[in-house]
Image (spheres, helix red, strand yellow):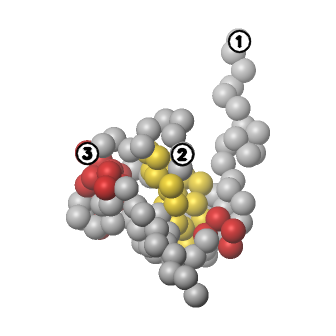
Amino acid sequence: MPQIISLIPRWASTWGALQRTNAQVRSQCRCCGMQHRVDVSVQILRFGACSSPVNLQDRCMVVGCHGSVFYLVARTYGRQWITMDTRSAPLEASAPAVNAVSLNLGPPAKR
Ligand SMILES: [Zn+2]
């Protein structure tokens, strides 16, 4: 069986690198699919600047959900999101992404 080697870009290799490059980070729950924006400075306080979001197991923050999340990163707004999970194909094995766009929650109407 061929070994799948995932290439994680250097700017996304650690929480500290993500903070230095001002990258965008999201979490996505494998169970409920809910996506959250991730505050990288909070992750640095929790795990340390030298720790990595790659294959990090963390629990879903949605009330009542017992799922675990994986992380997605993008260099900046509008760039491709990169999945920080090298062990499997998390997007195929997980619930579809749920966020304000998928829930059709646009900005409030202007008065
Ligand atoms: Zn969840």
Task: Out of 2 and 91, give the one closest to the viewer.
Answer: 2
For label 2, count other residues whose C-alpha is less than 10 Å away and answer few (under 14), some (14-19) or many (20+).
few
Q: How far separated are the C-alphas under marks 2 and 1?
A: 34 Å
Disc number placed over residue 20 in the picture, else none: 3
> What residue lies at 59% left-to-right and 54% top-to-bottom?
35
The quarter of the rendered structure image containing the C terminus is: top right
N-term-proximal mark, 2 vs 1: 2
Q: How far separated are the C-alphas under marks 3 and 1?
A: 39 Å
Task: Out of 8 and 68, give the one closest to the viewer.
Answer: 8
From the viewer's perspective, tell me whether residue 74 is left or right of residue 62: left
Disc number placed over residue 80 in the picture, else none: 2
For label 1, count other residues whose C-alpha is less than 10 Å away and answer few (under 14), some (14-19) or many (20+).
few
Q: Amino acid at mark 2?
A: Gln
Disc number lying in front (2 or 1): 2
Give the SS element for disc 2.
Answer: loop
Residue with the mark numbered 1: 111
From the viewer's perspective, tell me whether residue 16 is left or right of residue 87: left
Task: Out of 73 and 44, give the one closest to the viewer.
Answer: 73
For label 3, count other residues whose C-alpha is less than 10 Å away and answer few (under 14), some (14-19) or many (20+).
few
Q: Amino acid at mark 1?
A: Arg
